[in-house]
Amino acid sequence: MIPNQWYVVLDASQVRDAPVGVTRMGEKLVFWRDNDGQLSCLRDRCAHRGAELSKGRVVSNGRLQCPFHGFEYDSSGHVSKIPANGQNAPVPERFGVHSYPTHENHDWIWIWWGEDPPADLQPPRYFDDLDDSFVYGQARDAWDAHYTRVIENQLDVVHLPFVHYNTIGSGCRTLVEGPGVLWRDEDLFEVYTYNKVDDGSHPRTPDQVDVPRPGVDFKLEFLFPNLWENHISQDVRIVAAFVPVDDEHTLLYLRFYQRFLTLPVLGKIVARLAMPMNLYIAHQDRRVVVTQQPKASGLTIGEKLIQGDRPIVEYRRRRQQLIDRARQAGTRGERQ
């Protein structure tokens, strides 16, 4: 994973009244809400005897209580109370666990994954074309794959007529022109596809195709480190969060956004009804992606790439730049 980044890690509805323990970025984490609904995230291991804090409870002061000996943790990860020492006994500074900055918006939960967040840490970004006029349906899907492979699959415009021959790839459009790639800024790029039936012509290069594509709404967008949007039309989007669990497992959070049906209840029902087909398409991908070797992607992993793989190359280059930048800043390196 790339250190010093905001990662979507959960849907906001997954954390309610009780503590929630999950594995993310290869670490056990605990999330909970205080009495005002404010979210906190700590490493899920008590500083005292190593018990999982997620098996504890939120006490009346909004702090997280360890289930083993009742140590209480505040949002910073500091132990504020050791019951065995008495309620008025000071707690040594050494009693604490690492806390992660959290952010909640658009019904997502982000954490800033790093050791030392900057004093001026800015909130994470989201796709600016999604507003309250959209409603969505959602599904979560487990993949036995490294998160980089799942991301790259959604940037891969070459596989469509083969993996999705009977769904979104029907029509035998095997010739890939371009694809076009447009960087909007250093952490967001768009992909424009120009697939067509092979007529014997030589495909145009990425520099020869239009970006953006005139008169066509469709494009793919990727926002580092783990968000993707399929901009199907002005009224339909598909968004995916590629949530790293560990080195060999990823949770795909998939949302179908729509605003062509504006009646609130019916619009939500329609969005939910779209999810089975979206999952079916995702499972067509999953069947192949989980077989890829090596498990993790990278710049030099022995693959022989082609022109149509340009979006994947762009993703890998920028990812490596972010990893290198984090290393130069003195943080821990990326885990494979």
Image (cartoon, rainbow, N blue to C red):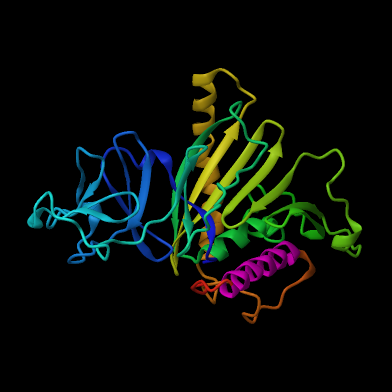
Closer to the camera in the image, 167 or 291: 291
Closer to the camera in the image, 314 or 334: 334
Majority SS type along the magenta span: helix
Residue at position x 66%, y 59% from top?
162
- Point out residue 233 in the picture as x, y percentages from the top left corner: 71, 35
Q: Is residue 141 left or right of residue 188?
A: left
Residue at position x 37%, y 43% from top?
39
- Point out residue 176 in the picture as x, y percentages from the top left corner: 80, 60
The total number of labels drawn is 0
Closer to the camera in the image, 274 or 192: 192
**Residue 288 seen anywhere in this rendered image of the structure:** no
Residue 324 belongs to the span the image colors magenta = yes
Region rendered in magenta: 309-328
**Residue 58 seen anywhere in this rendered image of the structure:** yes
- Location of residue 306 (image quadrant): bottom right
Closer to the camera in the image, 190 or 48: 48
In the image, residue 212 sits, relative to residue 48, either above or below, namely above
Residue at position x 57%, y 69% from top?
326
- Point out residue 42 in the picture as x, y percentages from the top left corner: 34, 56
In the image, residue 69 sits, relative to residue 299, either above or below, namely above
In the image, residue 178 sits, relative to residue 216, either above or below, namely below
Q: Given the current orientation, which residue lies at the most extreme top position?
A: 263
Residue 193 belongs to the span the image colors magenta = no
- Point out residue 321 in the picture as x, y percentages from the top left corner: 66, 70
